[in-house]
Every structure is written in structure tokens, then in C-alpha cells.
Amino acid sequence: MDKEKFINSIKGVIISEEKIKEKVKEAGKYIDSLYDGKPILLVSILNGGFVFAADLARAISVPCEIAFMAAKSYQGTESTGTVNIILDIDKDLSQYNVIIAEDIIDTGRTLKKITEILKSRNPHTFKVITLLDKPERRVVDFKADYVLFEIEDKFVIGYGLDCDGYYRNLPYVAEMS
Ligand code: IMP
Ligand code: MG
């Protein structure tokens, strides 16, 4: 992609860097409050969740480990409807308070599938935290335990979220034009 097209496709900032920082701090405090003597396992869902998980991890002050899982469900701006797990966690989850850190809940398919898989491994406790939620877009029943920002049905980019691999490194969340 050329630089001009890259810049022109960013329609406008929806959530600023400052606003994100403020809400991530609050989410860190929420996670601290869940600690009960067993360590937290913060699970970053790749690729989109990596920026949020990295910042969230640094807002947590209780004993915490980090793990990664990857699922693929999107091509361009359209959901394909199928969710494939392409990277899995290799740990005994019964020893952990498992917390999923995801970038966005859209149709709900990805997290529904990941939740089913991880809950079947009997984690000590299990919670889902998402940076963004688009409740209008849901096609399967799924609710996160903690949502930082609820947004309208718009395709967004930045802070981990991409369009065909680009824009993940924007420090804010923007709408695509
Ligand atoms: P779901 O399975 O439909 O809930 O969607 C899950 C995945 O689709 C998210 O983890 C994102 O990676 C991607 N996704 C959904 N909406 C958007 C968006 O507005 N921008 C970028 N990626 C999105
Ligand atoms: Mg994702």
C-alpha cells in the first residue's frame, strides 16, 4: 500500500490514545481485584489483541503470567463465519485465574469458541476482557465480563486492529473511510 492511500483511509479518530490509557488503567485495577492467591494468566488473542494485552499487562500489579492464543476468522472487512485456532496454550489452566484480553467482539464467534475450549480445561476462574464491543453485530450469544468501550457498527482500525494487516500500530482507534 502506498503512503498516501494509507493516510487517506484513516477517516477519523474514534477513541484517543489518552482515553484508552485511562480505561486500561481502570481495567488493570479490575484484574487486581480478581486475584485470590492463584496467579492470573493473561491470554492475549493474536493478532488483534496484542497491543491491548501488552498495555493491560503493565496495568496489573498482582502475580501474572502471559500466554498467547491465535484464531483466524476474518478476511478484509468481512467475517468468514468459521473460527480456526492456529496457536494454543500449553499450560495446566486449573492453576490459574484465566483472563482473555481481546481487541473486539463483533459477531461473537471467536470468543464463543475460545471460551468453550478454555472452560473445558477447568480453569480456576475464567473472565473475558475486551477493548471494544460492537453489540449490534452479534450473531451468537456472547457477553464479555468487562468492556472498555462499546462502539457502533463501524469497521475500526488501530491499537491492534487491522485491515488486511495494516494499521495495527496506530496508537488510537480510528474509523476506516
Ligand atoms: P468475531 O468473531 O466476529 O466476534 O470477530 C472477532 C475478530 O474479528 C476480532 O478479534 C477482530 O480481529 C476482527 N474484527 C471484528 N471487527 C473488526 C473491526 O471493526 N476492525 C478490525 N477487526 C475486526
Ligand atoms: Mg482478534
Image: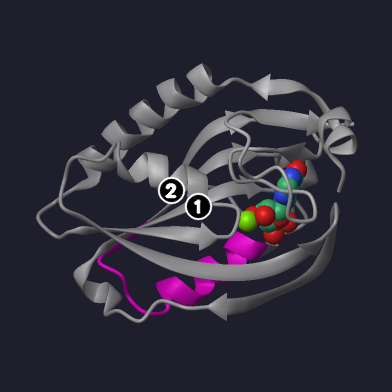
| Residue 32 falls inside the magenta stretch | no
What is the x, y in percent for residue 92? 26, 80
Q: In the image, 28: left or right of 87?
A: left
- Which residue shows up at 52% across the image and 72% down it? 116
Question: Of the residues shown, which amino acid type is indicated by label 2?
Answer: Ala
Give residue 50's mark. Answer: 1
Quarter of the image where one finds residue 90: bottom left
- Model colouring: one colour
Ligand 2's quadrant? bottom right
Are the residues at dot 2 and dot 1 in contact (C-beta closer than 8 Å)?
A: yes
From this viewpoint, which residue is outermost toward the left?
37
Q: Secondary structure at mark 1?
A: helix
Q: Is residue 152 visible?
A: no
Query: Is 90 located above or below residue 175 in the figure?
Result: below
| Residue 16, position as x, y percentages in the image | 59, 20
Residue holding disc 2 = 53
Q: Magenta stretch: give its range.
A: 110-126
Please determine whether, in this image, residue 142 is positioned above or below residue 132.
below
Which residue shows up at 37% across the image and 66% down it? 67
Q: For the point 13% across and 51% down, which residue is it?
A: 36
Q: Position of residue 107 (x, y in %)?
A: 74, 54
